[in-house]
Image (spheres, helix red, strand yellow):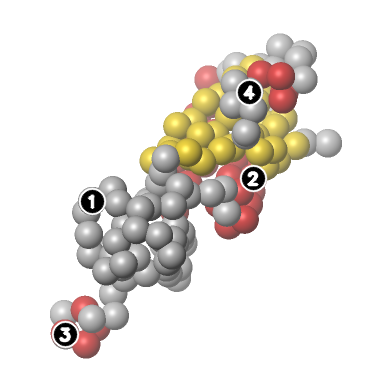
Amino acid sequence: MPEDIIAHLPIRLDSVAAWTSTSTFVSFEHERSGRVEANTKNENATKAKSPILTPALRDSIAFEIGAVPEVLAVFASVQDRVCYVWTIVNASDQEIRKRIYGKEKVLIGRFGQLDFEFNVMPSCGQNPKALIPDSTANLTFLRD
């Protein structure tokens, strides 16, 4: 690969958990893969800023998982570079889960800088919000 092309590739130069003023993390969207990088660097601090549920991440979760017709609601939160996602369905069915797992795989590929923890839970007739153990979780999708 020519050096001028390599110089423009987005790379993270450090491999430690704390960001420093010399750390570099370049945001980009790769046109072919749909991969999105979220810049979580805090320019005014020497430590990593905890990632937040950005609009791009929130909307991607809603559009991907919400596309499965049996999904009633989706909640998400981000803590310490881990995105927690709770998907609420009417019934726990293997075929529904397989379709949801495919959507989760797309999200993992798109947001490679985050770790994900996915949970698929049947509603059992309860209010979806009452099923979520994280009170800071945001509603990203709700089926009417």
According to the picture, the residue beneath numbered tag 3 turns out to be: 3
Label 3 amino acid?
Answer: Glu
Is there a contact, CB below 8 Å, between mark 1 and mark 3? Answer: no
Q: Earlier in the sequence, mark 4 or mark 3?
A: 3
Residue 16 numbered mark, or none: 1
According to the picture, the residue beneath numbered tag 2 turns out to be: 62
Q: Earlier in the sequence, mark 2 or mark 1?
A: 1
Which quadrant holds residue 9?
bottom left
Q: CA distance from mark 1 to mark 3?
A: 26 Å
Depth check: give the residue in front, 35 or 41: 41
Label 2 amino acid?
Answer: Ala
Q: Earlier in the sequence, mark 4 or mark 2?
A: 2
Q: Earlier in the sequence, mark 1 or mark 3?
A: 3
Q: Is residue 106 visible?
A: no
- Mark 3 is surrounded, within 10 Å at the Cα level, by few (under 14), some (14 to 19) or many (20 or more) other residues, namely few
Q: At which x and y percent is residue 14?
A: 22, 59
